[in-house]
Image (cartoon, rainbow, N blue to C red):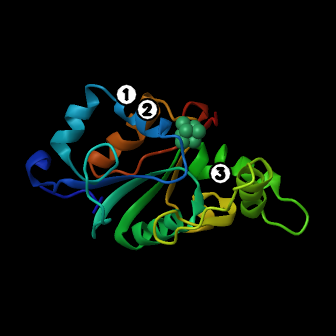
Amino acid sequence: MIAATPAQDPAQARPRLRLATVWLAGCSGCHMSFLDLDEFLFELAAAVDIVYSPVASDTKIYPEQVDVCLVEGAVANVDNLQLALTLRQRTALVISFGDCAISANVPGLRNLCSAPGRDSARTVLERGYLELADASGQLPFAPGIVPELLPKVLPLHEVIPVDLYLPGCPPSAERIRAAIAPLLVGQRPRIEGSSMLRFG
Ligand code: SF4
């Protein structure tokens, strides 16, 4: 867990942080910004175990007892929803990572497209696969393979409780570092001030 450990040698006594990063409905730009941490990634590697991440492991099952999870992207389909619910159950500190997770942002533009009597999912699917298709157009239907769209794209906090918000599109590497570095020494980051809170 994140609580500081009283010990003679904190570096040796503190257990390694179990860190996850998750990619829901986003462009991966927030994860690219995470990789821009450059040399701080070496510090991170010395202090954490990355137990689940699209950029660092091939693990398919979200693990138990995760200390911190950075969640990129909005909740747009049933797979996003299931993963969000699972990670909340198994994670001590969930960070809404980037503007899409916080506000739905770009994927949330779909919400503006609902036509009378049809939700936004139905509207965009019919537009893309039927109205603009040739005569053989059909709606995608592959249960278990193509996840069904939710009627509306949701920010993460409308689906699960979120502990911290890290805005930006994407959050800069400096901002990510400022959020993560305190966690490595058992402190809760202070996400405040214009340098940490600006959207976009
Ligand atoms: S917040 Fe910006 S960079 Fe991050 S996933 Fe959304 S569009 Fe991409």
Placement of the N terminus among the 4 image quadrants: bottom left
Among all residues in the image, which is located at the extreme right?
A: 116
Q: Earlier in the sequence, mark 2 or mark 3?
A: 2
For badge 3, the amino acid type reads Ala
Residue 161 seen = no
For badge 1, the amino acid type reads Asp
| Residue annotated with mark 3 | 104
Whole-percent x, y for residue 48 in the image: 21, 48
For badge 2, the amino acid type reads Ser
The reply to whether dot 2 and dot 3 touch (C-beta < 8 Å) is no
Residue 47 seen = yes
Question: From the viewer's perspective, is 20 left or right of 138?
Answer: left
| Secondary structure under the numbered disc 2 in the rendered image | helix
| Secondary structure under the numbered disc 3 in the rendered image | loop
| Residue annotated with mark 2 | 33
Residue at 42% over, 46% down: 189
Placement of the C terminus among the 4 image quadrants: top right
Cα–Cα span, label 3 and label 1: 23 Å
| Secondary structure under the numbered disc 1 in the rendered image | loop
The reply to whether dot 1 and dot 2 touch (C-beta < 8 Å) is yes
Whole-percent x, y for residue 175 in the image: 46, 33
Query: Is label 2 within 8 A of ligand 1 (CB to nearest ligand atom)?
Result: yes
| Residue annotated with mark 1 | 36
